[in-house]
Image (cartoon, rainbow, N blue to C red):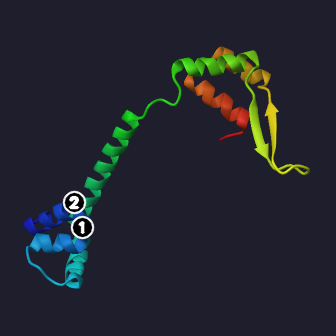
């Protein structure tokens, strides 16, 4: 990329405005319509488009990683074990709500199945809680 293209890329990445970026890159004020046309031409240059795409992908990955790293866990290990213990003892109930024929809005409570209880006893892990509740609630 030449110097004007690099200046355009930096200005475009900071403002996300192709007309403003083009005027900044060539360092010359002009009518917005003409600057937008110049910005469109710059965005069609393969090296410029690829560089912008790569920078945006890298930024997106970094932001998602930072969000994931700073996200608190949904449940603590102790809370997960409490849930598994309730399932194993048959105390946990899954409530499904829906429209009934006679009533407007009904709730139905189900006890965990024998298989779900056995899974809770055998496995004491995060995926177990997820799997048991997916089975109980019919989630995918």
Q: Residue at x 61, y 30 (%)?
A: 130
The residue indicated by pointer 1 is 46
Q: Residues within 10 Å of mark 1 (few under 14, many from 20)?
A: few
Q: Is residue 36 above or below residue 68?
A: below
Residue 40 is situated, as x and y percent measured from the top left of the image, at: 25, 76
Q: How many marks?
A: 2
Q: Residue at x 76, y 39 (%)?
A: 96
Q: Looking at this view, name the residue that lies furthest to the front.
A: 104
Q: Quadrant of residue 30?
A: bottom left
| 57 or 21: nearer the viewer | 21
Q: Quadrant of residue 139?
A: top right
The C terminus sits in image quarter: top right
State the SS at label 1.
helix
Residue 111 is situated, as x and y percent measured from the top left of the image, at: 79, 26
Q: Is residue 70 above or below residue 28?
A: above
| 77 or 38: nearer the viewer | 77
The residue indicated by pointer 2 is 14
State the SS at label 2.
helix
- Kindly report the distance in space between the C-alpha atoms of the residues bearing marks 2 and 1: 20 Å
Relative placement, left or right, of 110 versus 3 is: right
Q: Looking at this view, name the residue that lies furthest to the right.
A: 102
């Amino acid at each position: 990329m030449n110097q004007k293209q690099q200046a355009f890329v930096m200005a475009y990445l900071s403002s996300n405005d192709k007309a403003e970026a083009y005027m900044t890159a060539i360092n010359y004020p002009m009518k917005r319509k003409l600057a937008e046309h110049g910005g469109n031409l710059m965005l069609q240059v393969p090296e410029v488009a690829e560089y912008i795409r790569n920078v945006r992908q890298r930024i997106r990955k970094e932001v998602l990683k930072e969000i994931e790293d700073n996200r608190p866990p949904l449940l603590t290990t102790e809370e997960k074990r409490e849930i598994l213990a309730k399932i194993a003892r048959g105390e946990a109930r899954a409530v499904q709500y829906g429209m009934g024929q006679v009533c407007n809005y009904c709730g139905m409570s189900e006890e965990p199945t024998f298989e779900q209880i056995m899974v809770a006893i055998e496995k004491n892990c995060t995926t177990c809680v997820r799997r048991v509740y997916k089975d109980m609630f019919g989630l995918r």
